[in-house]
Amino acid sequence: MKTIHILYLAVFGLFIGGCSSQKSRKESFSVSTNQETPANLNVLKNHIETIIKDKKATVGVAVILNGKDTLAINNTEKYPMMSVYKFHQALAVCDYLEKKNIPLTTLLHLDKKFFKPDTYSPLRDKYPQGDLDLSLGELLTYTLQLSDNIACDILFDYIGGVNVVDEYIHSLGIKEVSITTTEDEMHQDMEDCYENWSTPLAAASLLEIFTTNDSLRNEFTDFVKRTMIECQTGKDRLVAPLSENGIIIGHKTGTSDKNSRGEYIGTNDIGFVTLPDGTRYTIAVFVKNSQEEMDANAKIIADISAAVYQFVCQKLPASSSEKKLSLTNKTGNNEN
């Protein structure tokens, strides 16, 4: 069993739990290094600790609540992103298209050389011969909704390589991330999967910037947001417990094969969530080097997603120690 380390970061002040009608604010995003646990996050902290306690995996979690309080668990680890990095790529593609004034309807000719036989690709399955024209918007849809590996490498080639994506994400202030290898390179050498890594907080922070920063808002990023909301992969992960009418979730999954030790390298999901009353949060869950079965890895992510949702809506029961603390605080206030 892996040792679990808990880290909490307070950002912009305390979050008041519950599904309030508070609107999100557009402001520059920064992360405090304050490691003191905000008292109002203890319930969520304890619940997530219980979920991951005996799992034969390293589980990393980050949540940013209404752009304010931030919770990070196992954030010092580097997690292989797998196809989660297609979100990062999409943002770099958007930046490239906007700067060069290239519309999403622009057609690319897809050379047969990209159509590798032994990789996950609904695009190749539909067009096994290659040598066709598809729009940039269609390629982004393949990568974000269906997590297509061939479409991903075509887009890397189009904008100038993985380093373009890496440099762009760093330019947004997200430093704890590295993107150095293509999907094909990861397929050729499984150890390369560990070269494309992120911390959970870096992933949640990037989602926060994406959803709140007005300077990134344009027709391209709006397209990415809509496409992520229509994501068709990982319905047993972050999305699973969020079936209430009116909840909006956009997300990107990542899934690996097993490494030489027989462990699943990475089972991941990151996303942005808006509840019917306007309450919002971003969340990233990474499950690394797991000896659990794949459905168990997905359930870890779904259970954490449920815990966060229940906390935000004040549905998580307080532990006996927290109830005692609450009573003590009330007594102290009466004496003053």
Image: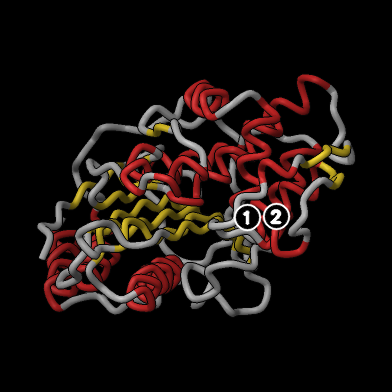
The C terminus, quarter of image: bottom left
Q: Position of residue 28 (x, y in %)?
A: 53, 28
Marks 2 and 1 close (CB-CB < 8 Å): yes
The answer to which quarter of the image holds residue 256 is bottom left
Q: Earlier in the sequence, mark 2 or mark 1?
A: 2
Q: Position of residue 103 (x, y in %)?
A: 87, 33
Residue drawn 49% across the image and 27% down it: 166
Tell me if residue 40 can be seen. Answer: no
Check disc 2 and report its element: helix, strand or loop: helix
Tell me if residue 299 can be seen. Answer: yes
Residue 148: assigned label: 1
Please indicate whether residue 257 sits to the left or right of residue 22 in the image. Answer: left
Please indicate whether residue 174 sits to the left or right of residue 317 in the image. Answer: right
> What kind of residue is marked 1?
Asp
Please indicate whether residue 188 sits to the left or right of residue 24 in the image. Answer: left
Q: Position of residue 144 (x, y in %)?
A: 64, 53
Above or below, 100 relative to 124: above
Task: Please name the residue that numbered disc 2 is placed on.
Answer: 142
Residue drawn 66% across the image and 43% down it: 114
Q: Position of residue 265 (x, y in %)?
A: 32, 56
Check disc 1 and report its element: helix, strand or loop: loop
Tell which of 173 and 162 is nearer to you. 162
